[in-house]
């Protein structure tokens, strides 16, 4: 699509479309300028988009920028790992590949990610952070071919969301070669997910067992600092 010479918008491009297009550029600048209007201005200049229109696209402020960036990662992850390639893998390998694809996309912008985590950790954004984590987990499970419609739909996403958040906390501080520490951490947490799924299967078979998903998720969260 050819951009308009006046605004830089492409033909029939909406503000939502523009937000998604500019998000990776905003993230690239956020590592230096933070998730600020300056990062949006720089991204607009790089894309040849009118600054005022770009500002309108991100009028929700830092959280709007971060949300759009994560959405762009969702799309790029799906492009990297097609359905055919994933279908040839076992479920453990699918989830691992999907998370690692996201890490590869985030790697050039770890400082921007670190700043995003600091913003989302603020009390006023805790619920938004939880929704973003849930959405990322949902995108990954769907890409992995999950079609669960019962309570498994929710437990799978809650578990993976917890693992993904913990992995990102490890990732932003990982100075090992090729992020080996993060990959090892992820492998252990994926093993936890597989054990969780097996435990749920046993629970369905033995109704007298008392299994607590909340307790299990808590263990995943508080083990985030372990290597």
Image (cartoon, grey):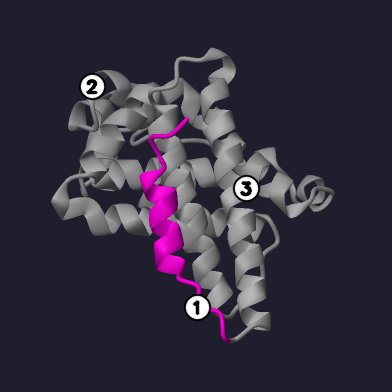
Marks 2 and 3: which is nearer the front?
Answer: 3
Where is the N terminus found, in terms of image quarters? top right
Q: In the rendered structure, find residue 33 and report the number of the disc placed on it.
A: 2
In the rendered image, the vertical position of residue 95 relative to residue 108, given as above or below: below
Q: Position of residue 111 (x, y in %)?
A: 34, 23
Does label 1 or label 2 sit earlier along the sequence?
Answer: 2
Question: What residue is disc 3 on?
Answer: 191
Residue shown at the point (72%, 45%) measured from the top left: 93
Magenta residues, start to end: 208-227
Q: Is residue 114 visible?
A: yes
Secondary structure of the residue carrying numbered label 2: helix
Does label 3 or label 1 sit earlier along the sequence?
Answer: 3
Does residue 138 appear to the left or right of 214 in the view shown?
Answer: right
Q: Nearer the viewer, residue 147 or 54?
A: 147
Q: Residues within 10 Å of mark 1 (few under 14, many from 20)?
A: few
Calculate the distance from the C-alpha at mark 2 to the C-alpha at mark 3: 38 Å
Secondary structure of the residue carrying numbered label 3: helix
Q: Nearer the viewer, residue 193 or 12?
A: 193
Does label 2 or label 3 sit earlier along the sequence?
Answer: 2
Q: Position of residue 224 (x, y in %)?
A: 40, 40
Q: Nearer the viewer, residue 136 or 2?
A: 136
Q: Position of residue 90 (x, y in %)?
A: 78, 51
Does residue 184 appear to the left or right of 18 in the view shown?
Answer: right
Looking at the rendered structure, the number of numbered marks drawn on it comes to 3
Q: Quadrant of residue 80?
A: top right
Q: Residues within 10 Å of mark 2 (few under 14, many from 20)?
A: some
Secondary structure of the residue carrying numbered label 1: loop
Question: What residue is disc 1 on?
Answer: 210
Residue occupying the far front of the picture: 208
**Can residue 2 be found in the magenta stretch?**
no
């Amino acid at each position: 699509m050819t951009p308009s010479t006046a605004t830089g918008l492409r033909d029939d491009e909406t503000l939502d479309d523009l937000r998604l297009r500019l998000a990776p550029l905003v993230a690239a600048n956020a590592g230096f300028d933070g998730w600020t209007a300056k990062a949006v201005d720089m991204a607009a200049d790089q894309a040849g988009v009118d600054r005022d229109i770009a500002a309108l696209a991100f009028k929700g402020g830092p959280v709007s920028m971060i949300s759009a960036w994560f959405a762009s990662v969702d799309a790029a992850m799906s492009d990297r790992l097609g359905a055919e390639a994933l279908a040839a893998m076992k479920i453990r390998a699918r989830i691992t590949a999907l998370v690692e694809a996201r890490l590869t996309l985030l790697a050039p912008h770890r400082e921007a990610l670190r700043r995003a985590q600091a913003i989302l950790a603020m009390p006023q954004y805790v619920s938004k952070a939880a929704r973003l984590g849930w959405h990322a987990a949902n995108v990954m499970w769907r890409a992995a071919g999950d079609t669960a419609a019962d309570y498994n739909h929710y437990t799978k996403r809650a578990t993976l969301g917890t693992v993904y958040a913990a992995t990102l906390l490890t990732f932003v501080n990982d100075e090992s070669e090729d992020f080996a520490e993060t990959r090892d951490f992820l492998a252990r947490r994926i093993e936890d997910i597989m054990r969780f799924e097996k435990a749920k299967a046993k629970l369905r078979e033995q109704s007298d067992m008392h299994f607590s998903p909340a307790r299990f998720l808590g263990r995943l969260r508080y083990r985030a600092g372990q290597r």
